[in-house]
Amino acid sequence: MSKRASKKQFTFISRAAPYGGNRPQLCLDIALAASVFEQQVNYLFVGDGVYQLLKGQNAEPIHAKTLGNAMATLDLYGIDNVIVQAEALVARGLTPEDLLLPVLVLSGPDISNLIARSDAVFNL
Amino acid sequence: MSSLHTISKSPDSRLLEQCLALCSDKDAILFIEDGVYHGVLAETLAKIPAAIAVYALREDLQARGLQERIDARAKTASMKKFVELCGDYDKVISWF
């Protein structure tokens, strides 16, 4: 089998806010691993997950690692397909300008299509 | 008897609605951890009766990049203020 044929499309759905638990970090670790193995990665932020991308994070006061710093460097790790749920932004009074990196904003049916097209989906 | 309600999950949890159903006048609500995301949603905060004081923990706001986004309805509280509030109210009710 050729290298090309073994490439699969992975979609990661991150739904949790950044510092209330370890789900966002776990999702990031798996996504980075997939990217290192040269799989096509879609990184999708829905619901409270969009807060992971908010500008101005500084987790020093709560003695944690600032997740936003990692998110801002996703493209360096080969993840340039960052998608944000339009409804999640609107519900939180946010616009793409409030986010740390350029994202693709998609809504309901487009996100469903993306998931349908994916070979594997991780939902954390 | 007055109560301090701490809410530590984001608005998606609907904990504020559950808390408000049991809240009395003279109570206070303090948002901590992911609860501080309530502090940027003006419409959500507007559901809290005026007699109830609303606070959000500064350290948790800073971590999440929310310190400039906090709505005027919620006061920013330091860790020291958190301790004082625990003493000021008869009990602390934790919503998590």
Image (spheres, coloured by chain):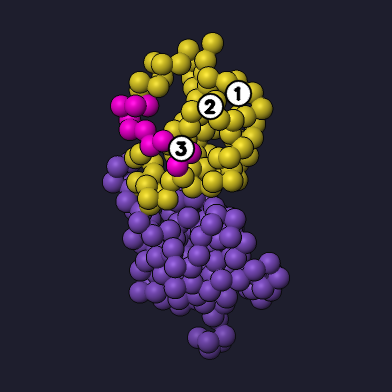
Residue B23, numbered circle:
1
Circle 2 is placed at which residue position? B52
The amino acid at mark 2 is: Ile
Label 2: how many Cα within 10 Å (few below 14, some 14–19, many 20+): some
Query: Depth check: B39 or A87 in front?
Result: B39
The local secondary structure at tag 3 comes to: loop
Tell me which numbered mark, 2 or 3, is placed earlier along the sequence: 2
Query: Can see residue A26?
Result: no
Tell me which numbered mark, 2 or 1, is placed earlier along the sequence: 1
- Provide residue B29's location: percent of width, then percent of height: 50, 29
Measure how far apart labels 1 and 3 are at the Cα level. Answer: 17 Å
Q: Which chain gets the purple colouring? A: A
Residue B74, numbered circle:
3
Is residue A108 found left or right of A9 in the rendered image?
right
Label 3: how many Cα within 10 Å (few below 14, some 14–19, many 20+): many
At horizontal 53% and vertical 57% (from top left) the residue drawn is A93
Instruction: Give above or below for A84 relative to B87.
Output: below
The amino acid at mark 3 is: Ala
Badge 2 sits on which subunit? B
The answer to whether the residue labelled 2 contacts the one labelled 3, judged by CB atoms less than 8 Å apart, is no
Badge 3 sits on which subunit? B
Question: Can you say which quadrant of the picture contains the N terminus of chain A?
Answer: bottom right
At horizontal 62% and vertical 29% (from top left) the residue drawn is B20
- Provide residue A15's location: percent of width, then percent of height: 56, 55
Looking at the rendering, the stretch of residues picked out in magenta corresponds to B72-82
- Provide residue B16's location: percent of width, then percent of height: 59, 35
Q: Are marks 2 and 1 on the same chain?
A: yes
Tell me which numbered mark, 1 or 3, is placed earlier along the sequence: 1
Measure how far apart labels 2 and 1 are at the Cα level. Answer: 8 Å
The amino acid at mark 1 is: Cys
The answer to whether the residue labelled 2 contacts the one labelled 1, judged by CB atoms less than 8 Å apart, is yes
